[in-house]
Image (cartoon, rainbow, N blue to C red):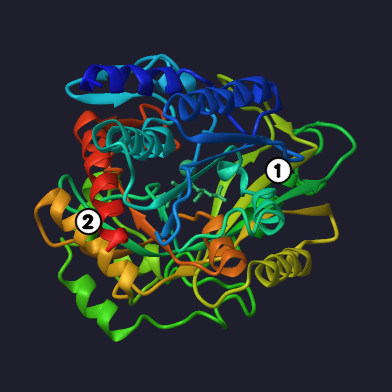
């Protein structure tokens, strides 16, 4: 298969608008799962489409051989919504290459990265007629909405999914060409709250000053979650279980490229913000945070409208670190909001999805194999990092299947995951194939 054939396949995969969060796209999510089924079948693997109460799970396995380790390669075929869609340079589901970089929703998160593994296996099978290990692909359609149905799926198929280790490319590289092994991820706890005030929208001149404004109250409640100067989270008990960095991590991270400088450059912010006493790596990878992901109230259109919206909505996610418990955190945040909510409005808090943090030992036998594969693929010493994002099922692999997950990221810091102009360099896609082949060889040793 030529490099152009591989790109054609990636483009076909990227054309599915497999947005898992929005019911309107359920058909495209399913079509995308069926595309994978066809792909796995054509490679000579044994594909299975499994229904769940949500989107389907795709499993495909090589013909198992006795005496070989089994590697489960995990990925997700669902993607995030595309809005604000007018900020895309080209339409999100019409992939294009500009300057050696593929632009499309899902290019980096996660279709480009998981297809690299699929095509790596296909290439090995085509050239060598066999694989060095038994392979099980598990590609799900609900990662971007918290993988709610995948943990029960693992439990129900524990024997069929038994493996020695899991490999995932759904994280980042610290910089272009720098091999990176991620050995930790943050957990997550999401919630949404609504502040309800008057029975209907009010004229803000006639009524303003006489009743509480739900949007103002929502802002006050949110600003009470974290100190604006010190960056400390003010929710009672929130940080009680935060574990300190290990000594080796502190010294290893010191040798990474300057994280503060890189962050300023990557994001374009005028100055950094975060918890006093911690650098950017620690703030993003090893400290918890609470963020607004969406909010709405009042008039959002052009020009002005003097109105007091009858309600205000805020979507919040907390990123969590060892040893915080997402359910406990949700309770603490909800209690905090209720405690500080004035009697002039009604507050409704709706807990959302959660996921546990993950931490593994990058110096374990499997960790060393991953490091070797990264070193031989990219030709330099791998960087060992944690990341701030979450992949909830990775903890499930440990708790349910009893195995560690090797996170060999291929995304670059400017890949614009979850944002307009998401992108993935062709070079990283191709490196992903080589990485897959090197990894399976290393894990066979
Ligand atoms: N690929 C990301 C996770 C990620 C990104 C890990 C960058 C490390 C570095 C994944 O697709 C993702 O976005 N996960 C969600 C999970 C959530 C919706 C439960 C996330 O982190 O927001
Ligand atoms: Zn994502």
Considering depth in this image, is 422 or 73 the residue closer to the camera? Answer: 73
Q: Which mark is residue 313?
A: 1
- The residue pinned by badge 2 equals 373
- Left or right placement of residue 268 versus residue 48 in this view: left
Q: Nearer the viewer, residue 291 or 39?
A: 39
Residue 181 x %, y %: 29, 60
Q: CA distance from mark 2 to mark 1?
A: 47 Å
Foreground pick, 394 / 197: 394
Q: Residue at x 62, y 41 (%)?
A: 295
User: Which image quarter holds the N terminus?
Assistant: top left
Quarter occupied by residue 121: top left
Q: Secondary structure at mark 2?
A: helix
Estimate the x, y position of residue 95 in percent, counting from the top left. Answer: 36, 17
* Location of residue 49 (image quadrant): top right
Helix, strand or loop at mark 1:
strand
> Which residue does the image show at 63% across and 25% down from the upper left?
30
Q: Position of residue 375 (x, y in %)?
A: 15, 57
């Amino acid at each position: 298969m030529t490099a152009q054939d591989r790109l054609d396949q990636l483009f076909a995969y990227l054309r599915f608008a497999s947005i898992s969060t929005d019911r309107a796209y359920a058909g495209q999510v399913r079509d995308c799962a069926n595309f994978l089924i066809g792909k796995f079948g054509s490679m000579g693997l044994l594909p299975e489409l499994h229904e769940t109460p949500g989107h389907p799970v795709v499993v495909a396995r090589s013909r198992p051989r006795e005496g070989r380790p089994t590697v489960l390669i995990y990925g997700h075929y669902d993607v995030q919504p595309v809005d604000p869609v007018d900020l895309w340079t080209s339409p999100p589901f019409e992939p294009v290459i500009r300057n050696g970089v593929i632009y499309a929703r899902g290019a980096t998160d996660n279709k480009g990265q998981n297809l690299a593994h699929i095509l790596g296996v296909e290439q090995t099978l085509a050239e060598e007629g066999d694989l060095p290990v038994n392979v099980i692909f598990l590609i799900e359609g609900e990662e971007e909405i918290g993988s709610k149905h995948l943990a029960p799926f693992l439990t129900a198929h524990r024997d069929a999914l038994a493996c020695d280790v899991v490999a995932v490319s759904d994280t980042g590289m610290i910089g272009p060409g720098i091999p990176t092994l991620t050995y930790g991820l943050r957990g997550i706890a999401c919630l949404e709250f609504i502040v309800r005030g008057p029975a209907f929208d009010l004229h803000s001149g006639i009524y303003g000053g006489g009743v509480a404004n739900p949007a103002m109250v929502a802002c006050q409640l949110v600003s009470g979650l974290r100190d604006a100067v010190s960056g400390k989270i003010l929710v009672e008990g929130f940080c009680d279980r935060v574990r300190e960095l290990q000594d080796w991590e502190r010294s290893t991270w010191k040798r990474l490229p300057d994280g503060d400088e890189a962050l300023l450059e990557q994001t374009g912010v005028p100055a950094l913000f975060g918890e006093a006493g911690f650098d950017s790596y620690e703030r993003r990878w090893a400290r918890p945070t609470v963020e607004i992901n969406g909010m709405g109230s009042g008039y959002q259109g052009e020009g002005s409208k003097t109105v007091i919206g009858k309600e205000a909505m805020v979507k919040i996610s907390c990123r969590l670190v060892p040893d915080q418990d997402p359910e406990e955190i949700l309770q603490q945040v909800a209690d905090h909001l209720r405690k500080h909510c004035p009697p002039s409005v009604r507050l409704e808090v709706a807990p959302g999805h959660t996921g546990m943090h993950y931490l593994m030992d990058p110096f374990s036998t499997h960790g060393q194999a991953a490091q070797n594969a990264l070193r031989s693929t990219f030709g330099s010493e791998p960087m060992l990092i944690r990341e701030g994002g979450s992949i909830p099922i990775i903890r499930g692999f440990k708790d349910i299947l009893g195995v560690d997950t090797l996170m060999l990221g291929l995304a670059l810091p400017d890949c614009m995951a979850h944002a307009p102009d998401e992108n993935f360099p062709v070079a990283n896609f191709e490196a992903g194939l080589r990485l897959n082949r090197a990894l399976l060889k290393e894990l066979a040793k």
